[in-house]
């Protein structure tokens, strides 16, 4: 999700190369204009969290780091997994967690929520299965598809010290860490971090919504200097001969976005610096002997004029930008 502050790109929130989990906003001057280009795609296709929320939801909070110290391994009574949540894939009646728990201690201040991050800044997450515990009581199942953060509401936390623990499923300890609980503790300690929220910055904001959609042909104009980081639509037309094979579209020098041919959604792209991606345009989507329209939406406004190519020599007839 790209974020823009007073018309300038402030960062991309999410998972993957070039993204961040936080957005720095300078609110010293009144009337700061914050715009989000939200994405509602890319959910998990399996696991216990297929209803994961996407895009922009809830308020924006001011957060600060919450020190928890190094994780410790403590031995406690194993937990009946299905007693907390059932059914769970490949968990049978009587299955329990391992007796070792990886535990952190946090000090909670009143009137603040606590955020538990389960993914590091490089986008790596916990790939095993476990129960997440608050003061010894299960609150969530950690597995493939778990959201990258979990929020503990201020109402559910009393003032003072609390323990956050991870109780691993047996197969996770055996398969992922070869039975070494200390290795599991180090791996989780490298991933997990804690924050506390102090103020909902958007609670008194004035909200508005604009639907993301293709602009009309009249909105395009000749290419000029494009403001770096600002989303842009690009349009060109090309000819296609009847009976010719599929057209190859080579994408270079772009960021992330969408490609349309004659109104048909050809696909999405996510390009790192120097990366190339090819898309095939099937003949059934092309108009023989007529002008065909290629639309490219780039989230950071990168120009395709010199870096995007069609395979036919006489393909490109002209281009323009919106």
Image: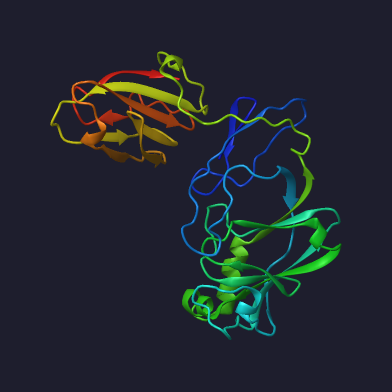
Q: Position of residue 180 (x, y in %)?
A: 54, 79
Relative to 127, does residue 263 appear above or below in the rendering? above
Relative to 258, does residue 197 appear above or below in the rendering? below
- Residues 136 and 274: in front is 136
Q: Position of residue 79 (x, y in %)?
A: 65, 81
Q: Position of residue 101 (x, y in %)?
A: 66, 77
Residue at image location 28% in from the left, 29% down from the top: 309
Q: Is residue 119 left or right of residue 75?
A: left
Q: Is residue 91 left or right of residue 265?
A: right
Q: Please say whether residue 127 is visible from this viewpoint.
A: yes
Residue 261 falls in image quadrant: top left
Q: Is residue 112 left or right of residue 83?
A: right
Q: Please say whether residue 247 is visible from this viewpoint.
A: no
Task: Identify the coloring.
Answer: rainbow
Relative to 258, does residue 8 appear above or below in the rendering? above
Residue at the left extreme of this rendering: 243
Residue 99 falls in image quadrant: bottom right
Quarter containing the C terminus:
top left
């Amino acid at each position: 999700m790209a974020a823009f502050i007073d018309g300038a790109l402030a960062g991309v929130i999410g998972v993957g190369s070039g993204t961040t989990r936080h957005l720095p906003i300078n609110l010293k001057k009144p009337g700061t204009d914050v715009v989000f280009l939200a994405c509602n795609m890319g959910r998990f296709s399996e696991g216990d969290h297929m209803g994961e929320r996407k895009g922009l939801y809830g308020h924006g909070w001011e957060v600060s780091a919450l020190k928890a110290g190094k994780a410790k391994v403590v031995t406690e009574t194993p937990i009946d997994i299905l007693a907390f949540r059932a059914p769970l894939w490949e968990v049978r009646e009587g299955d329990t967690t391992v007796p070792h728990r990886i535990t952190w201690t946090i000090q909670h201040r009143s009137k603040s929520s606590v955020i538990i991050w389960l993914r590091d800044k490089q986008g790596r997450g916990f790939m095993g299965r476990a129960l997440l515990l608050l003061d010894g009581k299960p609150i969530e199942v950690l597995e493939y598809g778990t959201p990258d953060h979990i929020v503990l509401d201020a109402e559910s936390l009393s003032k003072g010290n609390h323990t956050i623990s991870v109780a691993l499923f047996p197969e996770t300890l055996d398969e992922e860490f070869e039975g070494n609980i200390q290795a599991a503790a180090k791996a989780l300690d490298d991933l997990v971090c804690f924050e506390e929220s102090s103020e909902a910055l958007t609670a008194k904001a004035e909200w508005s919504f604009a639907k993301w959609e293709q602009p009309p042909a009249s909105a395009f104009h000749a290419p000029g200097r494009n403001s770096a980081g600002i989303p842009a639509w690009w349009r060109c037309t090309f000819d296609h001969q009847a009976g010719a094979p599929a057209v190859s579209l080579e994408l270079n020098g772009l960021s992330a976005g969408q490609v349309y041919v004659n109104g048909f959604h050809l696909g999405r792209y996510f390009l790192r610096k120097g990366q190339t991606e090819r898309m095939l345009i099937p003949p059934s989507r092309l108009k023989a002997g007529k002008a065909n329209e290629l639309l490219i939406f780039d989230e950071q406004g990168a120009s395709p004029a010199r870096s995007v190519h069609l395979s036919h020599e006489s393909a490109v007839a002209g281009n323009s930008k919106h």
